[in-house]
């Protein structure tokens, strides 16, 4: 399988988006806690969101989800 490097500008853009998501995630958690959300719910929602994003990235990149033998 041939490996292709992503362009430098795409890597920088991804890092900027990830930084913005981390920052907004912290702010959203603070707002949720101020409105009565408990820690268990916050952790569950954040984990589910992360799993969904990773799944989308894997599907977008064309990576097989099958576990090899």
Image (cartoon, helix red, strand yellow):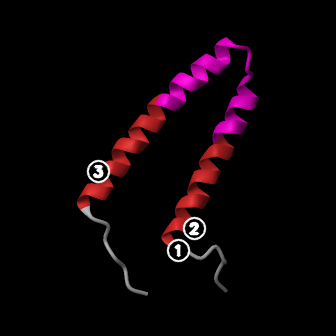
* Quadrant hosting residue 54: bottom right
Which numbered disc covers residue 62?
1
Q: Which residues are magenta?
A: 24-46
Q: Give how far across and how far down residue 30 sits, in percent.
A: 58, 19
Decide whether the magenta segment is chiefly helix, strand or loop.
helix
Q: CA distance from mark 1 to mark 3?
A: 21 Å
Dividing the image into 4 quarters, which one contains the C terminus? Answer: bottom right
Residue identifier under label 3: 12
Residue identifier under label 2: 59
Residue 66, above or below 35 = below
Dividing the image into 4 quarters, which one contains the N terminus? Answer: bottom left
**Mark 1 touches mark 3? (CB < 8 Å):** no
Q: CA distance from mark 1 to mark 2?
A: 5 Å
Q: Residue at x 32, y 67 (%)?
A: 6
Residue 40: within the magenta? yes
Q: Residue at x 52, y 23 (%)?
A: 27
Which numbered disc covers residue 54?
none
Q: Is residue 16 left or right of residue 44?
A: left
Q: CA distance from mark 3 to mark 2?
A: 21 Å
Numbered label tally: 3
């Amino acid at each position: 399988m041939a490996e292709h490097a992503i362009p430098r500008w795409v890597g920088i853009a991804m890092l900027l988006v990830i930084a913005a998501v981390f920052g907004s995630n912290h702010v959203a958690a603070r707002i949720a806690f101020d409105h009565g959300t408990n820690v268990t719910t916050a952790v569950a929602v954040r984990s589910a969101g992360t799993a969904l994003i990773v799944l989308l990235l894997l599907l977008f990149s064309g990576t097989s989800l099958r576990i090899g033998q």
